[in-house]
Image (cartoon, helix red, strand yellow):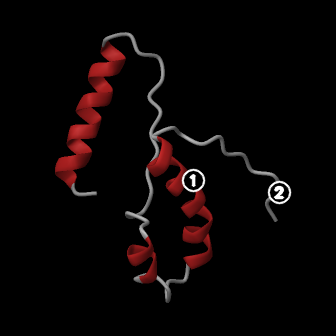
Amino acid sequence: MINLIITEICGLVGQALNSGQKTIPMHIVPFEMAKEDMNNYQDSTDLSFRQSLKPAYDYFEQTWQVPAISVIDIK
């Protein structure tokens, strides 16, 4: 993100907190994950991580609801 967008996000979060909102859910993906965009990262060293984000991204794009995500095992 560029500084202008970060500044806008910070301002909106500040307004929400000052208005009494207790939490600010924020979900950020590294880039738009349409098939064409994913193809641009086939040589990326973190391709497997990016691919693991894709199902959640697709779910949100289809339903506009945040998917429930949990970590089962990290090794």
Return the residue at label 2.
Answer: 73
Residue 28 spot, x, y in % from top left: 43, 51
Local crowd size for mark 1, using a 10 Å CA cut-off: few (<14), some (14–19), many (≥20): some
Q: Is residue 38 left or right of residue 66?
A: left
Q: Where residue 46 appears, x then y in whole percent?
A: 56, 76
Residue in the image at 51% along x and 56% along y: 58
**Residue occupying the far top of the picture:** 20
Q: Which residue is farthest left?
A: 4
* Disc number lying in front (1 or 2): 1
Residue at left 32%, top 20%? Answer: 16
Q: Quadrant of residue 50?
A: bottom right
Mark closest to the chain's N terminus, 1 or 2: 1
At numbered mark 2, what does the secondary structure look like: helix, strand or loop? Answer: loop
Circle 1: residue type: Ala
From this view, report whether residue 8 is shown above or below residue 17.
Answer: below
Left or right of 56? Residue 31 is left
Say which amino acid is labelled 2. Answer: Asp
Give the answer, above or below, for where 15 lies relative to 36.
above
